[in-house]
Image (tube, rainbow, N blue to C red):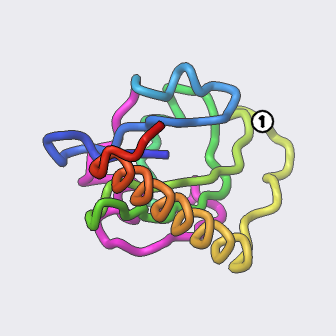
Amino acid sequence: MWLIDDAREALVPRFNSGPKAQDLVGVLRQPLDRGIISLAFVSEQSICENDVYRNDRQDRTIDEKLDQLTCAMLAVPIVFGREMRGVISAVKLKARESDTADPIGFSSEDLRFAELVTSTVGCLLDAKLLELCLGLEE
């Protein structure tokens, strides 16, 4: 999960379940003027991209820092508190210098599922915010 920073200039990874999460979360930043994740945020449109590393719009900075190759990506904008707050993404990776076949890409069904999950997470966050505002937290 990537959230917009206070200056609204970059997306910052705030949660990651991947093997290099500690090298990504709270460490790296994705400027809004480049990259597919940022395009999803700025356009407020979901993106399903296979063969990502062949796309000129991909910002390769994070792949280079983490020594990986992003093969496929889902990027879904997340709204909560009535505002665009970030992007939830899923990726399929392989080692940068690997000559193994790319993992199977994402399908339109995968994208629909990611959009459902992201919408649900947004609703759950809105419910938690309302609970906090009303002093109903336990």
**Residue at image coords 78%, 36%:** 98
Residue 101: give x, y in percent of width and height.
85, 51
124 horizontally vs 72: left or right: left
42 horizontally vs 23: left or right: left
Determine whether 90 is above or below 30 in the image: below
Query: Start and end of the magenta stretch?
Result: 28-55
Residue 119: give x, y in percent of width and height.
52, 68
Kind of element beneath mark 1: loop
Q: Is residue 125 magenta?
A: no
* Count of marks, rendered view: 1
Q: Which residue is the site of mark 1?
A: 98
40 horizontally vs 118: left or right: left
* Residue positioned most to the left: 7
Give, as a three-letter code, the residue at label 1. Answer: Ser
Q: Is residue 29 magenta?
A: yes
Q: Is residue 57 visible?
A: no
The one nearer the camera, 65 or 44, is 44
The one nearer the camera, 88 or 40, is 88
Residue 97 position by quadrant: top right
Determine whether 8 is above or below 54 in the image: above
